[in-house]
Amino acid sequence: MPRFVSRFALFVLLLASIFVSAATFGQSSAPNVEPPTSASAPSAAVAQPVSDEVAEAEAAIVSSDWKRAEARLAPWLAAHPADARALFDAGYVAVMQNQQEDAAALYRRAVEANPKSFEAHVELGLLLARQGKLAEARPELAAATTLDPGAAGADAQARAWRALAQIDRATDPAQASEDLLEALKLSPETPEDTLLAASLAEQAGQYEAAEAAYRRVLAQNANSATNSAANYAAASAGLAHLLILRKQYPEAETLLRKALDQSPGDAALTTQLATVLAAQDKAEALPLIQKLHEAHPQDAAITRILAEVLAEAGEAAASDQLYVRLLTASPDDPALLVAHGGNLIHQLKFAEAFAAFDKTTRLDPANAGGWSGLAFAASKTNQPSVTLHALTMRSKYLPEVPSTYFLRATAYDALHQKTAAAACYHQFLAASAGKFPNQEWQARHRLLVLEDKK
């Protein structure tokens, strides 16, 4: 009986780990937008008459004396609650003190006080994006792109466009590309831009363009003036992903080992390397993923990959312990149920396997792996009618193979449907071509009995 979960399911599981772990890819709820820097400081805020109190607060901000700045701003704002510049300054001070909700409220008040404040819209949008409040962040950033950045300049406006691109990438990749193009009209391309362009091209199925972009980032030295180790790692992960898609495992392995020299212990790169090694049947894969799992025991994606590598290594019981743990958190995950059922089959726990596969097909009627497993488990639990039904359902999604002909033949045989059983035994023998000697002997023996009694 072949394994129900191919090792290439590792790739599917791997994607979650790559795109969640590599911040440059920005697939988590919050996009990859930068924290406030000195460029965000209030010196660039909307020009307006400045009181002595606000001027003193801004001098304190320049010195990073947040408490003194807050002490100057609080009484001023109590008396002048609509001072947009002071509100912006207070929001900035709150951000730098990690008072995120207070900062958002102050920035909102600054926008209300002066709807044309480019800086207030930008900083509010970036803050909301970092908090994962993308639906609230987008209108603020979009508004900023229509406003005069004033002293903040074109680079600040490009920053707003880049943040929009990060937000749009998940729901509207085409719009994200347009956002990025607008940013590049205002400032030079950065490695982060190239990575985003590569990711967007990959989402659109433009793999050659994505590969070219990843290679452009890799052509720059990590830790150079224009690149970083994080960018190099992200580009390596992206290119390795494409190589894995094309099953170019040796090249992917070389790439990933080089990247890990630059970023030792990187979880995403290590996960990919373990996947590539497993695909090449290299023994190094198991200890590598085990070590990674020890370092990240709560990471579900890494746990799934370790479970699969253990299963491929013939460690069904150890693998299943991990799948059972994963199913506790995600009891209705069809992929986990199929993998769990496969392990139960290899442990000869056929009734439990039947239950796992039956649940899979109820949750996901188009799950071919679930129907394959159900057919086999039903045959082992003496349910020939269920076997035939499962095989019929499987045939809607996958072609027949020798094992399905054999299961069908034995099911018909158990139901005493001799003509149908004989026909399926013949189909099995024609398809098996000597690859399954034990089943072929059984098929020939049953044909002698069935055909002699016609």
Image (spheres, helix red, strand yellow):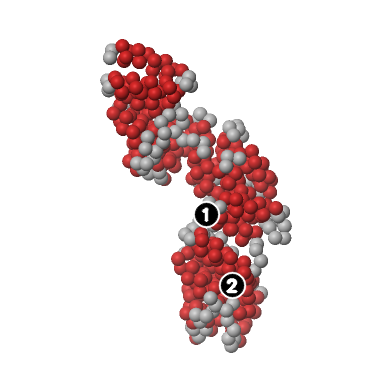
The amino acid type of the residue labelled 2 equals: Gln
Which of disc 2 and disc 1 is earlier in sequence?
2
Identify which residue is drawn at 30% across, 26% down: 384
Secondary structure at badge 2 equals: helix
The amino acid type of the residue labelled 1 equals: Ala
Give the labeled residue for mark 2.
157
Q: CA distance from mark 1 to mark 2?
A: 27 Å
Q: Does residue 35 show up?
A: no
**Foreground label between 1 and 2:** 1
Q: Nearer the viewer, residue 111 or 435?
A: 435
Image location (x, y in percent) of residue 283:
60, 32
Name the mark on residue 186: none
Give the labeled residue for mark 1.
204
Image location (x, y in percent) of residue 257:
66, 43
Identify which residue is drawn at 55% across, 41% down: 293
Q: Nearer the viewer, residue 362 or 46?
A: 362
Q: Quadrant of residue 64?
A: bottom right
Label 1 packing within 10 angstroms: few (<14), some (14-19), many (20+): few
Q: Is residue 243 left or right of residue 138?
A: right
Image location (x, y in percent) of residue 353:
37, 32
Q: Is residue 331 left or right of residue 167?
A: left
Label 2 packing within 10 angstroms: few (<14), some (14-19), many (20+): many
Q: Quadrant of residue 190?
A: bottom right
Identify which residue is drawn at 60% across, 37% down: 277
Note whether 398 is above or below 58 in the view shown. Answer: above
Question: Quadrant where the C terminus lies?
Answer: top left
Question: Quadrant where the N terminus lies?
Answer: top left
Q: Does residue 181 show up?
A: yes
Secondary structure at badge 1 equals: loop
Q: Nearer the viewer, residue 358 or 325?
A: 358
Image location (x, y in percent) of residue 123:
55, 71
Identify which residue is drawn at 56% across, 55% down: 201
